[in-house]
Each structure stands twice: as C-alpha cells, then as structure tokens.
Image (spheres, grey):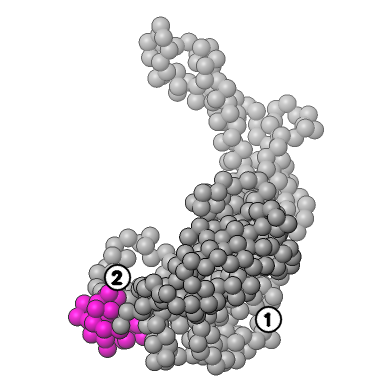
Amino acid sequence: MQTNVEMLGELQRRAHMSVAVEQIEGEILKRLSRLARTAKIAGFRPGKVPMKMIAQQYGPQVRMEVLNDAVNETFVSLVQQENLRVAGYPQIEPRQDSTDQTKLEYTATFEVYPDVVIGDLSGIRIEKPIAEVTPADVERTIDILRKQKVSFEPVTRPAGKGDRVIVDFTGTIDGVEFPGGQAKDLAITVGEGRMLPEFEAALAGVVAGDNKAFELTFPQDYHGKEVAGKTAVFSMNVKSVAEPNLPPVDAAFARGYGVADGNLDKLHEEIGANLKLELKRRIIARMRDQVMDALRKSTPIAVPQALVEMDIQRQMQQAAAELKSRGVEPTSEQLRPEMFREAAASRVALGLLIGELVRQNGLDAKPEQVRALVEESAQSYEQPEEVVKWHFQDRTRLGDFEAQALEQNVIDWVLARSQVAELQTTFAELTGVAG
C-alpha cells in the first residue's frame, strides 16, 4: 500500500490509497467459494450449486463487503503507519482521475485531533467560595419542607400575602382574545411573584365571588412575542380564597421525612448533613465553572468539526426527546443545527483539553476516591452500607462517581497552578435560597 497524506487545513487531511484489483477479485472468489459449500438453492444439494449461480445471487453483496473491508483495512494501516489520531469518520471517495486498471484507487478525507499544550495558568484568578451551614440554614430548610406539606383553609376575608386564590380569567387585546390569555381554576399564591405586577396588584384584597376587570401592559421583552409591549384587558372571576395552614414541627413531621422515631434533634442533624453535602457540591460546581473557563482561555485549540457535528446530533436527539416528553412534536425550525453549534464546539474543546490534561498528568479517578464519594453519597440513605454494596456490585453504577473524582482531580491541578482567592459567602447565596 502506497499512501500520500496531504494537509488541507490545520486539522483536515487527505490520503490517497489504492488496493490491487487482483487482491480484491481473489478475496471475492474465496468468499464465494466458502458460500458455495453451504448455500441452499432450490433444486440443488448443498455444496453442488454451480459457481455461476452463486456469483449471480451473492456476488454483488460479497463484492460490496470485500470492497468495504479492503478500504477499512488500508485506512487502518495508514493510521498506524503515519501515527495519526483520527477524529470522527473518514469520507471515502473513488479517484476519478485514476488510469491504472490494476488498482482500485480512492481518497480518504478526515480530521485529526489537535496537539494540545496546556497554556500558562499562573495569571488566572479563581475565586474559591468559603461558606458553612448554619442553624439558620437548617431552620430555613425546615420552613421549606413545611411549605411543601401546606394545606389551605377557605376564608371569607380579603386575600392577603401568602393566601391561595383560585380564579378564572380571560384576556383580550383590542377586544380579541389571544393565545395564553385564558385560564380556568388557576391557583395563584398572592405575593409569590409568579404573575406580572399588574396581575398581582389585582389580586390584593379580593374575596370569593369577586369579578374584576383590569388592564395589564406586557413588558417589551416578554417571552410571548405576539403580545410583548401590548396592553390587554383582563376579566377575572375569583372562585375562592384560602389561607395557608403549615404543619407543626413535631414528631409526626419528623417521621414524614424519614426519622423513624420522630426525634427532632435527629431531623435537624440529618438536614444539616444533607445541606453540608449540597454546599460541597455547589462549591465544586462554582470552582468547576471557573476552572473550565480558565482552561479555555489559556489554551485556544482548533476543534475537529467531525466531533462538533456528532455532538450537535446528540444534542438535537436529546432536545427532540425532551419536546416529545412534553407532548410537543419537534419541528425543523425548533431543532436547527446552528442552535446547538456554539455549545457543541465549547463542549468538544473542553473534552479535548480535559482528556489531554488527564492523560499527561495521570489524573484518572483513583479507586479510593471513587469509594469515598460513594460512601459520602450513601450517608443520606437509611442503610448506607447496603447502598455502597449495591453500587460496587456493578461497575456501570460507578460511572458518575468516577467522573466526579476525575473532575475534582482536574480542578485541583488547575488550582495548584493559578491564583486562588477565597471569597466569603453563605449557603443561601450559593444555593439561591432566599435568606
């Protein structure tokens, strides 16, 4: 096999290859001969079918298989001979200018992985959040858990903040109803901020049985572009007003959240432990984002478009599945490849950087790291030992933990080579929970 590899760009290559026609024909004959021993054709005993009939029936398929195998073998041989790191799949085309009848000549156009040299990180500043879980964070979480079990009691007084109001409404613009401007039996918590300010204001002080009309001007940047910036008139019927009834924090409440003996101190301890684990995850996530940004900025690399296209296809498939799960049939307008290209290019670039960083510096996940992460995660279950045992019964269940450990190794490696500044913050700020 003779090859000639051309550079078409920073990552794109083209190779000219050939296979002897005599070799291909010989392999076709060999495979047809093997088929002839067992082929079953009406009127002939196995092994007695004339070769001419075997060639007529199986020849085209066998020829295609032999050609594909020959092309694959020569390309694999080229990759090994030239020590190439091929990204994606090659595009194979027969050579139109071939004049040698003794050879099958073709070209393979493909991309290679870029050479990655991690840049200087010493000038990169990374902020490391410093926070702790406080008793106030635990109490705030208990308040959230209470709200999850809230019940509502109907009242005859005017609606106030925190009350649940159930309404029917119809909105019109210039006297015409518009999509999304109607609702039946919609439950709204007053003061929660789910509705636009004018709608919230119209709910203040209403009582069951009220009928109200009010105007509402949609913001210019409203997500519904057909009504953005326009003024609508709403007609609203108040069907009920109810006040929240939060459950007491007692033994029954504790049992409802997994504390079998109803001990409130244990409930506080378990919530505190879970919050500490969540805090650790949030800090790692904040650090990860900064580290990945630092890697991208310090090490610009060319990205193989073949890998980008593959990632785009994966994203489109995931987006289509998500739409279908919500009962929406995806359209070509909703799933245009360009919508995913930037994210795909970024993800591929990061994958290449991290892969090379791990390879060069031995940052693979260590067994003891994986076990520690599994054990930590298992502490939130009633029988942590059984949870750990379950994960290690099947290595495929350890994938997420191995990824976490590898990611932490990369973060630590970057932090050791950059400027790290501690940033005092709070659990509430890191988790986005109102203080």
Question: Within 10 angstroms of label 1, few (less than 14), some, or many (20 or more) residues?
Answer: some
Q: Earlier in the sequence, mark 1 or mark 2?
A: 1
On screen, residue 335 above or below 245: above
- Which residue position is annotated with label 2? 388
Residue bounds of the magenta highlight = 249-273
Residue at 32 percent across and 65 percent down: it is: 391
| Residue farthest to the right, as pictured | 97
Residue 257 included in the magenta stretch of the image: yes
In which quadrant of the rendered view does residue 37 lie? top left
On screen, residue 256 above or below 276: above
Q: CA distance from mark 1 to mark 2?
A: 40 Å
Amino acid under disc 2: Val
Residue at 59 percent across and 58 percent down: it is: 170
On screen, residue 41 above or below 155: above
Q: Residue 32: x percent and y percent?
A: 50, 21
Amino acid under disc 1: Asp
In which quadrant of the rendered view does residue 229 lie? bottom right
Q: Is residue 100 visible?
A: yes
| Residue farthest to the top, as pictured | 43
Residue at 63 percent across and 46 percent down: it is: 331
The residue nearer to you, when weighing 336 against 237, is: 237
In the visual, does 294 lie left or right of 30?
right
The residue nearer to you, when weighing 45 against 322, is: 322
Q: Residue 367: x percent and y percent?
A: 38, 72
- Which residue position is annotated with label 1? 120
Q: Residue 163: x percent and y percent?
A: 46, 76
